[in-house]
Image (cartoon, rainbow, N blue to C red):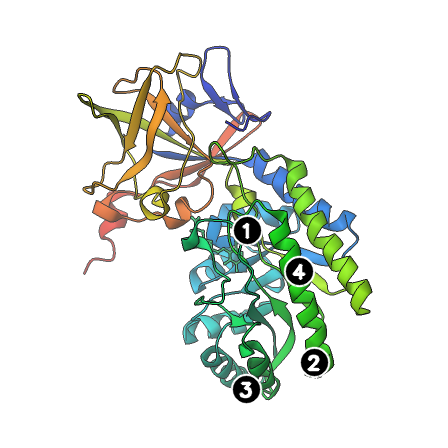
Amino acid sequence: MNQRDTLKVNNEGILEIGGIPADVLVKDYGTPLYVIDQTHVENMCKTFVDALNNNQINGMICYASKAFCNKYIYEVINKYNLGADVVSIGELYTALKANFPANKLIFHGNNKLEEEINFALDNKIKYFVIDSYYELELLDKLCQEKEYVQDVLIRVNPGVEAHTHHYIQTAKTDSKFGFSLDNGDCDLFIKRVKDCKNVNLVGLHCHIGSQIFESKSFEIAVDKMTDYYKKCNDEFNVKFSVLDVGGGFGIYYSHPDPKMTYNDYTNYVDVICNTLKRKVQQLNIQMPYLILEPGRSIIGEAGITLYKVGSVKSIKDVKNYIAIDGGMFDNPRFALYQAKYSVVAATKMNDVCTTKYSIAGKCCESGDLIAENVELPNMQSGDLVAVLSTGAYNYSMASNYNRNLIPAVVSVKNGVSRIVVKKQTLEDLIKNDV
Ligand code: LLP
């Protein structure tokens, strides 16, 4: 467990989050329950924003909404002056409904729909990140109809391989995202963008992957992107002013991930900024406006999911299972990526771990597990299980598979808890059924 002031074990051996024991949260709100340690989210926001400011580079930290999207998170990040990236009309709508400033929103996505483009244009968001000829033509046409000129970035695929699970790597030469630098695709696209009267090309974007620990990957990406930025200004007669190098900073899930500290994230930003400064000097260009898009690192470790154990099953000489009241409908990451999590017995934190358990979800699917072979104390029905680092890509990837209800989200800070997303109701499940 990555211990911090707001995540600890109290004298009774109970996991305490934001000053509130897990069993108290469960008594008040039930299970399964997504708990967000707001202090940790705020510290992460401050860490990124301060790191950028301390490097004296003009830019913006844009939270990647896809990691965890609801009105609550936009309110928190807005307090700390972050921007946000959105990838659908749903994320955009949620941000606007939370009074998030449209001029701090960036719109990503490899296949934005006409309805989505129109909605974003009508709300005057800051940048579109264009990802295809199809989108370019549609955007140009819709802008023309509205007599509007939209600032855009191009999604570039710099061909940098980051060390991470291959399903969540997005910038190899073969990728559904972006225009490749290495095979000339991007050059051709830029020439086409320049012919469009209603889009104003202001810079480049890349995102090299997710759950990356190697800061060298970011260094290489910034190096390549800045070279290309300069080449565009020289050869294609564009006036770039923005460089967006995406997100992807890793978090601690379980051994052997590094136990990340706030300083480690400051270091990532420093590496990116120092590389950029060096390149700017070497290439003799103006410092671009720098955008970073961390998602997982802002919300991931702040999230903890609490479950209650139901059935306990031992298969002699094979395995022990504990079944929880959640599963792949609230956290599909084991089923999708074999993602590893730290799992603890939330009310038996000081008991000796004697047994290996696999944590089974309640969906009708053998692959519905949360973790395998976790060492825990002797577990019984009714015990509480906490799965750590579930803030990112859990709530946002939740589904109603098997018509299970998406759990509530509770935020905790300084010993006070509050519901920020209500648990779905049975009525919610059928309200669109005709
Ligand atoms: N910017 C862009 C353009 C992205 O595509 C992503 C993530 C991010 C920023 C934020 O990356 P982060 O800092 O969160 O790593 N569902 C997968 C993760 C997919 C990430 C996709 N893009 C998972 O559960 O691991």
- Establish whether ligand 1 lies closer than 8 Å to the Cβ of label 1: yes
For label 1, the residue is 248
- Residue 356 position (above or below residue 182): above
Q: Tag 2: Cα neighbours inside 10 Å, few (<14), some, or many (≥20)?
A: some
Residue pictured at 68% horizontal, 43% vertical: 266
- Residue 356 position (above or below residue 132): above
Marks 3 and 1 sit apart, C-alpha to C-alpha, by 35 Å
- Establish whether ligand 1 lies closer than 8 Å to the Cβ of label 2: no
Q: Are marks 2 and 3 in contact (CB under 8 Å)?
A: no
Dot in front, 1 or 4: 4
Which of pointers 2 and 3 lies earlier in the amino acid sequence? 3
Q: Which mark is residue 238?
A: 2
For label 3, the residue is 144
Q: Position of residue 307 (x, y in %)?
A: 34, 29
Q: Is residue 174 left or right of residue 362?
A: right
Tell me where residue 223 sits by quadrant. bottom right
Answer yes or no: is residue 30 visible: no
Element at badge 1? loop
- Residue 145 position (above or below residue 71): below
Which of pointers 1 and 2 lies earlier in the amino acid sequence? 2
Residue pictured at 37% horizontal, 47% vertical: 337
For label 4, the residue is 222
Marks 4 and 3 sit apart, C-alpha to C-alpha, by 34 Å
Element at badge 3? helix
Which of pointers 4 and 3 lies earlier in the amino acid sequence? 3
Residue pictured at 44% horizontal, 64% vertical: 89
